[in-house]
Image (spheres, rainbow, N blue to C red):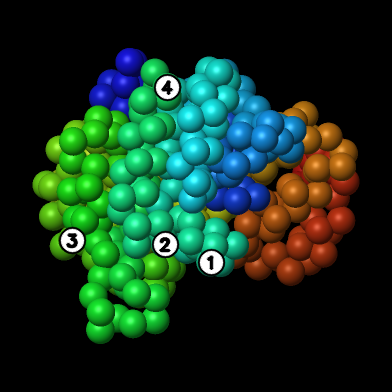
Amino acid sequence: MDNFWQKLNKPILSMTPMAGITDTAWRQICKMWGADVVFTEFVSADALNYDSKKTLKMLEYHASEQPVVVQIFGRRIDMYPKAAKVVESLGVAGIDINFGCPAKKVAGHGGGICLLRDLDTVKKIVSTTIESVNIPVSVKSRIALNTVQGHPEKGKTTVFDLIETLADLPVASMIIHGRTYETPFTGPVDLENLKKAKLAFKTGTFLINGSFQTIESVAADLKYTQADGIALSRALYGQPWLFKQIRDYLETGTYQEITWPEIKDTAIKHAHLLYQSKGEKGFKEMRKHLLFYVKGRPDASTLRKELVQVENPEQVEKIFKNI
């Protein structure tokens, strides 16, 4: 097995799957700005098992994205062998299994983070997936969740329970979000337990997630936790250059602010890449990205009114040309 995770220079700068965001255009933009690893949008093992054309379309990628990882989710163990083989057949670098998603449509049906309440199933899913393919398998999860939903007094299932459950399996990498299921996106990140989890996880690389505050804080968090890298998610909205800024700061102790011409060039390139992959019908998805790119500008309100109506890259170029 070619475990690409082991060959990456440390610290690893990765992104994580985000529904409706991490399509091939966005992944190419992130690679352009220095991402070491990119992830597709997470997809259902069940959908892959039944050869969903829509799902397979989501997994199309450009060679420049490699190493690209496909993240899959689902509750049923029997769905994973074929799903994993389908993913492997695409030529991607790895498979990631989602045990961390707090979204109601996933966790509400017992998937994502809620699978940690059934660690026997978790182990069978991971072992079955590893046995089914010859590419590295990684997992993503969170620090903890209540063992019984709605009853914190009955204890928590933690990342340490997950690590112990998977200890005898060759898990290539683990990405852990430093918040619990009950506080998915707000409140402090548990750096102390991320540090302990890094020490406990012995089989592969360990990345932290959810802690981004500033470029400087990333360096501090990596130093404190001794993690092998960081995986960025929502912090990247409209800021794919964070990868370069973080790398520069880690290597030199300084980084450059991004100029407006660089932002414009990135947005225009992004628009062309998205149009190439999704055509006129899918181009409307670009509008949300454009709103992120202009966030914080004094004329953002006026620009938003124009950008929410764009139909093609040429219109994007025309708007940005005059700014």
Q: Which mark is residue 108?
A: 1
The Cα–Cα distance between marks 4 and 2, rounded to whole angstroms, is 25 Å
For badge 1, the amino acid type reads Gly
Q: Which mark is residue 237?
A: none
Pointer 2 residue? 114
For badge 4, the amino acid type reads Val
210 over 256 or under it: above or below: below
User: Is the Cβ of the residue at disc 1 closer than 8 Å to that at disc 2?
Assistant: yes
**Residue beneath the point at 54% across and 28% down:** 82
Q: Quadrant of the N terminus?
A: top left
Query: Could you tell which of marks 4 and 2 lies nearer the N-terminus?
Result: 2
Q: Position of residue 5 (x, y in %)?
A: 31, 27
**Residue beneath the point at 81% across and 38% down:** 313
The Cα–Cα distance between marks 3 and 2, rounded to whole angstroms, is 19 Å
Crowding near the residue tagged with mark 2, few <14, some 14–19, many ≥20 C-alpha atoms within 10 Å:
many
Q: Which mark is residue 133?
A: 4
Query: Could you tell which of marks 1 and 4 lies nearer the N-terminus?
Result: 1
- Secondary structure beneath label 4: loop
- In the image, taking residue 102 as reference, residue 208 lies left or right, namely left
